[in-house]
Image: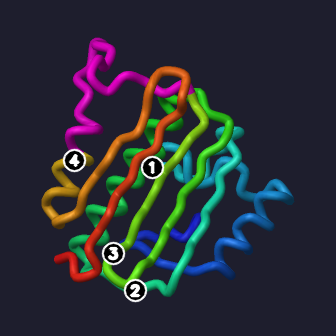
Amino acid sequence: MVGGLRRGGLCWRSAPAARSIRSRERHGFDRGAGVGAPGNPGECTGRLTELVAEGTAYVFNPGAEVHVLRIVQEALTNVRKYAQASHVRLLLSFGTEQCRLVVEDNGQGFDPDHLPRGPWPHFGLQSMRERAAAIGARLTLDTAPGKGTKVILELPRGVR
């Protein structure tokens, strides 16, 4: 298990787990953990990663968890590939009506209306939006050149 994520689903952990992760980061054990390539989540990237969990955790159905995991995985992959960030923060906030998940970096940001074209098609943001819609969640992207990027996923508590 790395940074609260485990193979086969999400393991929602609260503040003690986040404190443990921050402590391990301070000592250099998890520097960059969870921001690596999907097949190698422990790849050392030199980014300081921070996990913050607030509220009382609750469980979503396994199908929704897979979509959430893939959205977070894509957001972290985008940080690794494009953001040129030195810090990434993952916030899980469990409210009575919804869970809010934020992946935020201090990187270069971008203009979401003018994505650069390359030799390969870019389906990451589209896939994240489709996954969010499939589980009745709302995905918001807050970014601009020079501003960093914030991916916000809001899931109603009874998400299917």
Left or right of residue 115, residue 104 in this image: right
Where residue 18 sits: x, y (%)? 66, 72
Q: Which residue is mark 1?
A: 39
Q: Within 10 Å of the Cα at label 2, are there few (<14), some (14-19), or many (20+) other Cα atoms?
A: few
Q: Which badge, 4 or 1, comes first in the chain's sequence? A: 1
Quick one: SS at disc 4?
helix
Q: Amino acid at mark 3?
A: Gln
Residue denoted by label 2: 58
Cβ–Cβ under 8 Å for marks 4 and 1: no
Q: Residue 8, relative to residue 143: is it above or below?
A: below
Amino acid type at circle 1 is Gly
Closer mark to the observer between disc 2 and disc 1: 2
Q: Nearer the viewer, mark 3 or mark 4?
A: 3
Image quarter for residue 143?
A: top left
Q: Look at mark 3 in the image and give the residue it sits on.
A: 98
Whole-Å distance between the Cαs marked 2 and 4? Answer: 23 Å
Q: CA distance from mark 4 to mark 1?
A: 22 Å
Q: Secondary structure at mark 2?
A: loop
The front one of 150 and 42 is: 150
What residue lies at 25% left-to-right and 57% top-to-bottom?
138
Residue 30, image x, y percentages: 71, 57
Give the distance between the C-alpha atoms of the residues marked 2 and 1, in whole angstroms: 27 Å
Q: Which residue is mark 4?
A: 129
Q: For the point 83% across and 58% down, which residue is it?
A: 26
Q: Which residues are magenta?
A: 108-127
In the orientation shown, which residue stands out farthest toward the left?
A: 134
- 158 and 31: which one is in front? 158
Q: Earlier in the sequence, mark 2 or mark 1?
A: 1
